[in-house]
Amino acid sequence: MSGRLTTHVLDISTGKPASGVIIELFEYNKLTREYEKLTQTTTNEDGRLDEPLLEGESMKKGIFQLMFHVEEYFNQDGNKQEPPSFLDVVPIRFRIASEYDHYHVPLLIAPGGYSTYRGS
């Protein structure tokens, strides 16, 4: 059975899922020592993705980085913050050690900070 990589985003300042957050996934290339973009997606109304970021043959061991574009989320619907948002893009770097496990990387956000952990 193949593993998968999933995420979701919760806005703890409102107690609601964060919909419309742009998320990019990068993989670290040891040869070039740079991160290469694999995909980009956006959270749905439940703050989740409609599909896993990685699964099946694309799920492999390595170093990855998720980039959560939270400033755009906080400024959506004409709610531009003054002063400008403290957070712009939240990067989370992590390791996939087994292509058979489920890696869930949730992000809890507020205008002034964030938190993450390895979920289930």
Image (cartoon, rainbow, N blue to C red):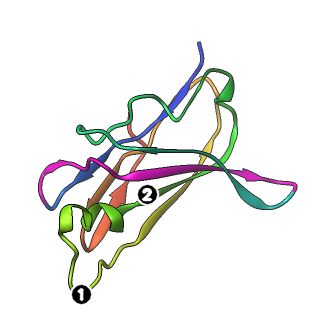
Relative to 97, 29 lies left or right: right
Residue closest to the eye, 82 or 59: 82
Residue type (three-letter) at the residue carrying disc 2:
Phe
111 lies above or below 31: below
Residue at the spot of label 2: 68
* Residue at the image point whose x is 20% and y is 84% from the top: 82
12 lies above or below 54: below
| Circle 1 residues within 10 Å: few <14, some 14–19, many ≥20 | few
Secondary structure under the numbered disc 1 in the rendered image: loop
Residue closest to the eye, 100 or 51: 51
Q: Position of residue 49 (x, y in %)?
A: 38, 35
Residue at the spot of label 1: 83
Relative to 114, 88 lies left or right: right
* Residue at the image point whose x is 24% and y is 70% from the top: 111
Label 2 with label 1: CB-CB less than 8 Å: no
Q: Position of residue 41 (x, y in %)?
A: 46, 43
* Residue at the image point whose x is 35% and y is 52% from the top: 21
Residue closest to the eye, 62 or 29: 29
Relative to 109, 50 lies left or right: right
Does 84 lie within the magenta span?
no
| Circle 2 residues within 10 Å: few <14, some 14–19, many ≥20 | many
Residue type (three-letter) at the residue carrying disc 1:
Pro
Does 16 lie within the magenta span?
yes
How far is mark 2 from mark 1, CA to CA?
20 Å
Residue closest to the eye, 55 or 37: 37
Q: What's drawn in magenta, residue-wise?
A: 14-31
